[in-house]
Image (cartoon, rainbow, N blue to C red):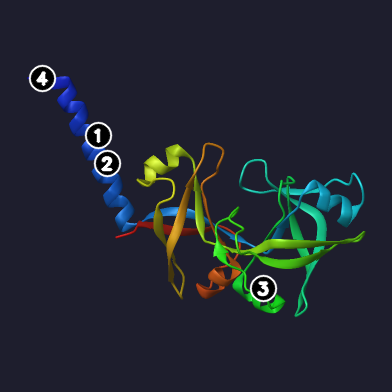
Amino acid sequence: MNYFSETEIREIVAQVVARSCLSGAAEKGQEIPVEISARHVHLTREAMDVLFGKGSQLTHRRDLSQPGQFLAQERVKLVTARGQLANVGILGPLRHRIQVELSLTDARVLGVEAPICLSGDLEGAADVLIVGPKGVVSAREAAIVAKAHVHMTPRDARQYGVQDGERVSIRLGSERAVTLNDVVVRVREDYALAVHIDFDEANAAQVSGGSITGLLQKAR
C-alpha cells in the first residue's frame, strides 16, 4: 500500500481548499469587466477589394480590448429587402469569412431572422447585402446575434473557477439590475478578460459605455 508523505498531504489539502474558495467566490459573484459591442462586420480580403477597391486596406482608428483587434475608419451599409442600417463599423484584421454581428433590434430593422450564437458559428446565419463606396457584396449565411460571452486567459479561468465552454451568469448592477444567464466562457491565451454584451442587453439593464463591471456567478 502506498502512503502520502506529510508534505504531499499538505499540498493536496491546500489545493482542495483553494478550489473550494474559488468555487464559493464564483457562486457569490466576482466582479468582472463588461464591454458593450455595437453592430459591426468582419470582412475578407475579397470583400475589401469589392467594397473599397482592389488592394485596399483597413485604416486603424483605435485598438479594441482583445489583443490584435481594432476598429477601422471605414464604414459600410447593410441592406436587405426589408430594411437597412447605415454607418456600420468594421473590425480588423481581415478574416477568412465574412461575419455580421447584430443585436436582435438590428435584425428586426433588417427584417431577418439572425440566430443567437457564438462568433464563428454561422450555420443558419442570415443573408445580407454589404454596400461600400466601390461595390456591393452578397454575404450569405453571415449575420448573427452574438451570444453574450466572456473572454478569459487560462489564468483568469483559474481565478474565477471556471472552464472553457462553461455557462455562467453575469449580473449587471444598476437601478434596473439584470442577470444574464447562459453566458459562455471562452478561454485562450491571447484573450483579454472581458464580458461582451450587445446594446439590447445593455439597454435592458440601463448601463452605457465607460467603465462597467458585472458580477460573474457560477451556474447552479
Q: For the residues marked 2 and 1, what is the alpha-carbon distance in whole angstroms?
A: 6 Å
Furthest residue toward bottom = 82
Could you say where residue 211 lies in the image, as x and y percent from the top left?
A: 56, 57
Q: Is residue 135 left or right of residue 58?
A: right
Which residue is labeled 1 in the image? 15
| Nearest to the observer: residue 201 or residue 185 | 185
Q: Of the residues shown, which amino acid type is indicated by label 4?
A: Asn
The disc label shown at residue 2, or none: 4
Give the mark toward the camera: 3 or 2.
3
Q: Of the residues shown, which amino acid type is indicated by label 1?
A: Gln
Local packing at callout 1 (Cα closer than 10 Å; few below 14, some 14-19, many 20+) is: few
Marker count (numbered): 4
Look at the numbered disc 3 and give the secondary structure of its residue. helix
Which residue is labeled 2 in the image? 19
Could you say where residue 11 lies in the image, as x and y percent from the top left?
A: 21, 27
Pointers 2 and 1 in contact (C-beta within 8 Å): yes
Which residue is labeled 3 in the image? 106
Lower position in the chain sequence, tag 3 or tag 1: 1
